[in-house]
Amino acid sequence: MTGTFWAILPPVIAIVLALITKEVYLSLMVGIASGALMFHGFHPIKAMDTIFAIMGEKIGGNCDILIFLVLLGILVALITKSGASRAYGKWAARAIRSKRQALFATVCLGVVIFVDDYFNCLTVGTVMRPVTDKYKVTRAKLAYVIDATAAPVCIIAPISSWAAAVGSSLPAGSNIDGFTLFLNAIPFNYYALLTLVFLTFLIVTNIDFSKMKQYEQEAFSIEQSDKDHEEVPIVGHGQVKDLILPIFFLIFSCIGFMLYTGGFFEGAGIAEAFANCSSARSLVLGSFLALIFTFLLYIPRRVLAFVDFCGSFAQGFKAMTSAIMILCLAWSLSGICGEEYLNIQGFVRDAVGGSTMAVIVMPILFFVISLGLAFATGTSWGTFGILIPISVTVLSGDYGMMSVCVGAILAGAVCGDHISPISDTTILSSAGAQCKHIDHVATQMPYAMVVALCACAGYITAGVTGNGYFGLLAAAVVLAVEMAVIVTLEKRRR
């Protein structure tokens, strides 16, 4: 079953079960177990040994991300307990006077924090939750806004951890500059570009539909009681600056450590430093330094008592346990499908790389395959790490169409990542918004698929015309039609 179609079965089992039962932990465990059993010919002892070997390896390899989650959870608990979040909410209410403005402020912050999607997801939620709660923005809607301004922004930002990952995906000996290829592919990343347009449309018109509309109508009162029940007790007398200063220090220290780990202070340029940095380690170093800064900001001024400061450690860790658990299980599922085991990547590589696709169908096929692979594995970077070398090799003599296909691969990777319950950025968006994970997945999926259909139309047009800009125009026209239909249907309902 290694490297065959059957390698897709475990993630499909996990995803379908999660959507049906709403129980993410058990669904992921069933997916992992089914994959291990398939790999070992349904030998239970060997399968069990493999499961925990993979889990240990994945947790060890991603420990920086887990440490960052814990440190950020502690920082959030401190800011909340100090009363700074409450003070910020009252202050923001004077500048932000409506639900629409609160959502636009969230979008703007998401666009500003473009260097890393993990950092984006958690920081935006931390800063904007007090404001969006005040204007009755549900946590599912907040999670969608966070997710829609995380990966889609990072994947079109030249200076980001994503740009570095794309550049490092090129095959050896290709003689192509990865950064230049990334820049040329930005206009052809239809899904990322149109997601930002569609998000703006939803906020301006204040329209929701499908699962999100149902959630907005039914869930707020229940959700609000859950928030009140889970609220960290406020025992300090924090001011607005006690939220703003730690968050700004966190942002600048993380960016500074990205430059540091990328060699900027040893002579590397800014773009080169971001390309070579260790983003996960930088987030750990930056968040740890921000925690020290917060201690020095709070304790001498008696914003919090020392005992309350220390008590926030356990509360912050507890707040992140759900995200950590889901991440560990999702990484383990990705591991059992990896090259050493079921090798889902090998199946896709053989299926795509060995084909003689006509250039006319390459953009749409790369988009669909990339979407499916990201959906099944929950990883964007792993997806374009597999498909970009194939596209570069197949289209080595046609740089223009190569840029379109790379854009299609990146678009499909982000789209699949958005609709996958086992995606790390989807999980972290839920954590940042403090939304139930399966609620975020169910409400975001219809919105993502609306934009995905537009992208499909665009890539078909790009293949037929041989021009990526015609494809972008076609995708934009289809999106405009879809938005007009949504507005018309909403008016009829009213």
Image (tube, grey):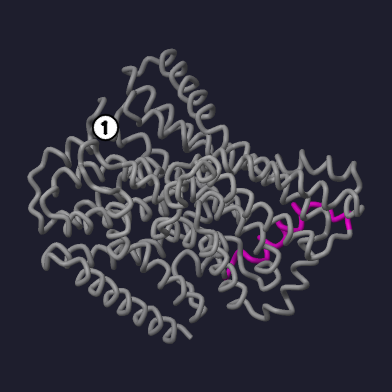
Q: Is residue 483 above or below residue 2?
A: below
Q: Is residue 226 magenta?
A: yes
Identify the residue at horizontal 69%, vertical 54% (top origin).
249
At horizontal 34% and vertical 50% (from top left) the residue drawn is 413
x then y, percent, for residue 275: 42, 46
Does residue 312 appear to the left or right of 116 in the view shown? right
User: Which residue is more in the foreground, 3 or 183?
Assistant: 183
| Residue 303 in the image, given as x and y percentages of width and height | 88, 55
For this rendering, which residue is in front, 273 or 442?
273
Residue that mark 1 sits on: 6
Q: Which span of residues is magenta-colored?
A: 217-236
Q: Residue at x 55, y 54 (%)?
A: 121
Q: Which element type, helix, strand or loop, lies under badge 1?
A: helix
**Residue 410 screen position, x and y as percent:** 32, 53
Q: Would residue 225 be counted in the magenta stretch?
A: yes
Residue under the image location 44 percent in, 61 percent down = 153
Residue 18 is at least partly visible in this image: yes
Q: Position of 490 compared to 455: left or right?
A: right
Q: Quadrant of residue 183?
A: bottom left
Count of marks, rendered view: 1
Tell me if residue 160 comes above or below residue 323 in the rendering: below
Magenta-drawn stretch, dominant element (helix, strand or loop): helix
- Residue 24 visible to an observer of this rendering: no
